[in-house]
Amino acid sequence: MSGTRRGNVRLVSTAAPGLTAPEVVTPAAWTGGPGRLLLDALPAMIVIVDHRGDIVAANEAWRRFGRENGARPTVAEGVGQNYFEICRDTALVGCPPGTPAAAGITRVLRRELPIFTLDYACHGKDEQRWFMLTVTPLESGAVIAHTDITARRRTEMSAAALIETGRELAGGLEPAEVARQVASSVVRVFGAQRSALYRLERDADRLVCIAAAGVGDPTRWHGQTFRPGEGMVGRAAAEERSVWTPDVLTDPKISLPGGVADRIRAEGFRSVLAVPLKTGDRVIGVLSLGDVAGRTYTEDELALLAAFAGQGAVALENSALYREIRDARDFLQSITENSPDAIITTDGQGRVTYFSRGAEVMFGCRAEEMIGTPVADFYPGGLEEARSVRRRLDQEGLLRNYESGFLAKDGRRVDVSASISVLRDASGAAVGTLGLLKDIAERRQLEEQLRQSQKMDAIGRLAGGIAHDFNNLLTVIAGRAQMILSRLRPEEPIYRDAALVRTTADRAAALTQQLLAFSRKQVLQPQVLDLNAVMTAMEPMLSRLIGEDIELAVVPAANLDRVKADPGQIEQVIVNLVVNSRDAMPQGGRLTVETANVGLDEAYARRHVSVPPGQYVKLAVSDTGAGMDEPTRSRVFEPFFTTKEPGKGTGLGLATVYGIVKQSGGDIRLYSEVGAGTTFTIYLPRVAEAVSPPDPGASPTATVPRGDETVLLVEDEPEVRDLAREILEGSGYTILQACDAQDAVFMAERHAGPIHLLLTDVIMPRQSGRALVERLRPLRPEMQVLYMSGYTNEAIVRHGVLDPDTQFIQKPFSPAGLGHKVRAAIDGARLPS
């Protein structure tokens, strides 16, 4: 007896050993008795064929499978059918693959193979199935067994799908793409109608569908939300475990949001399985499967789903972390790339590893050119300076506000303030440096402007103080000289000396006026002006002033705006600038005076600390002369600074221009290069007012007007007080003298008669002239006021501009000038100061 083993079943043949011709196997051996019982007990679908392939026996599993799957009755019964014909018939529908099966059976029957196996798919209408065909030889035929390997096949496919999904998810960086891959893989592996992945948004306390796959249009589920505990998805999240229902629409424990039930009913799935996505102990989402009503899941499928959910959770978490890292990186890159400051990193050897866009602009080169370049190339001190910085970094760990002139690609010097720190790895080891470099050229320019402004202000204060004291002296000298002249005849020998004293005093007074202009302490009487009209009126005079060797071009702008300034002072500015340009062109040249409307923006205002942004009128005087070097440009507005030979100039011309412009609320800029000429540009604020009418301003005659009124004279300088008293008493006035404010109040209180005029100095010890007026006004409301001073201050002048109702006389004054001012003040008229 011989046999072959198939599992735990031993099939027995009665063929005689050594038989060389096929022995017919009779059906009787297998259709009754123990043989039949043996075949029917086996779970595999088995038939026994003879050497021609005719089926001589078939077990119950074969017959049942045939009946359940619509086979013809004769095929389902099996016995008497030829297996090869069955193979040919089933090959037409692909179950099983007939040609490979027939070929394998033939080779076993011919004893060419000891055994033949073949795995094949035989899918039903509602499910997928796989079988394994096994053919083992008998001495007169063969045993053909069909074993259902669907569970094993699904396990293998699931494992493969899990591996493939893991591979796909590992490369997924976007959360939405990862979610889509998970949903698609679940539909593919488990054959579900619908799969959806929900992300838990903790801040909003809801689950939101971020991906869906399956039949129909899965995108309709995108954005669907569930609250924790709501629906199957919400239950899985709230209970932190997998939940299943055979019919979500009839399950009384399930509550669905509005519209969800209608959507489920329309799409036809009823069975729902929801699996939480967890990382550690934290739920981050839910994976749901929807299928036909009653769909169940085996333990293996649930385990596989849990594995899918675990993979999906990790992938989602990783992708979210990646997104956070990417967003942080993009944010940091946006900061570094949009920062106007230069950001440079180096490695441990001092080579550039990062060069920001701000660095490209600052140093005039591209990042690609600089990567790998030694950072020492940027230092003006080269390698030695770089080593010095490195030593300080090693000692201090951080270098703040390190100022140096770094070198750009084109060799120019870029003034920077650098903050440099050490870059360290996770272990704390130094791996390079990080440098934040700020261009401080503008700051240094502003600092220089501030220093220059402070210097000019200090010089101005000194000049103003000197001019004030000097004016008091000149008042006495000029006044006494005039009084002497009035008592002498021209033919007397001393007359010429007295006249020379008076003339010299007048020249000295003119110098003090220039000092006051520079110090911005002169009195201005501003009017609304059209600078075009001023230039045009001055053009003939300017032409005579510069001579025939210089070409004068006056270029007025169309529709020029108005400015508010003292017309006499503006004329002085133009004359001084034109004279300066004339002297710079001894061999002749071209001189241009032009105007324009300009707007100065915030950027200009930041670069020029004394100028607010706004609309201005520009007055520019340009020449083609020798130009100026930097040392000259830095001092050009200082009083008494001159490049002319001794005795050729006072050095006050440009200082006067500077003071007048500043006192008028404007700004002046100098642009000059050696050999390229010079341009002075003045900016005066525009005003929206009509041009002021001409001031008739009658000039006082040499004759002192007379009067019989009472004047209270207050002056702390005895010589000036005595001079004023003598001038006014000589003109018929009654004079009450006081040396200070307290004395003046005392006299005003005790004088029985009227006081027609208070003539007071502005600056006095203990109390100013303005404060004195405020004290006397209640006592003497009828009293007129005339101020006098060597210079003015805030007591009577607001930013150098007289209040409209203020009467003022500038020291030094002449006897005639004082007489006219006193008469005008008493009479209520106004004369120029």
Image (spheres, rainbow, N blue to C red):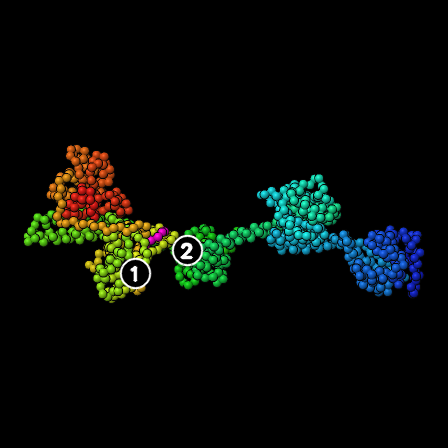
Q: Residue at x 26, y 63 (%)?
A: 552
Which amino acid lies under the numbered mark 1 shown in the image of this protein? Val
Dominant secondary structure, magenta? strand
As helix, strand or loop, the secondary structure at mark 2 comes to: strand
Name the residue that disc number 2 marks: 439
**658 left or right of 175?**
left
Name the residue that disc number 1 marks: 555
Q: Residue at x 66, y 52 (%)?
A: 217
On screen, 524 above or below 596? above
In the rendered image, is residue 284 in sight?
no
Between 370 and 373, the one lying in front of the other is 370
Which amino acid lies under the numbered mark 2 shown in the image of this protein? Asp
On the image, the x and y values in percent for residue 218 come to 66, 51
Q: CA distance from mark 1 to mark 2?
A: 39 Å
- The segment highlighted magenta reads 613-617
Q: Mark 1: few, some, or many residues within 10 Å (few <14, many ≥20)?
A: some
**21 left or right of 626?**
right
Which one is in front in this view, the residue at disc 1 or the one at disc 2?
1
Decide whether residue 614 is among the magenta residues. Answer: yes
Between 378 and 170, the one lying in front of the other is 170
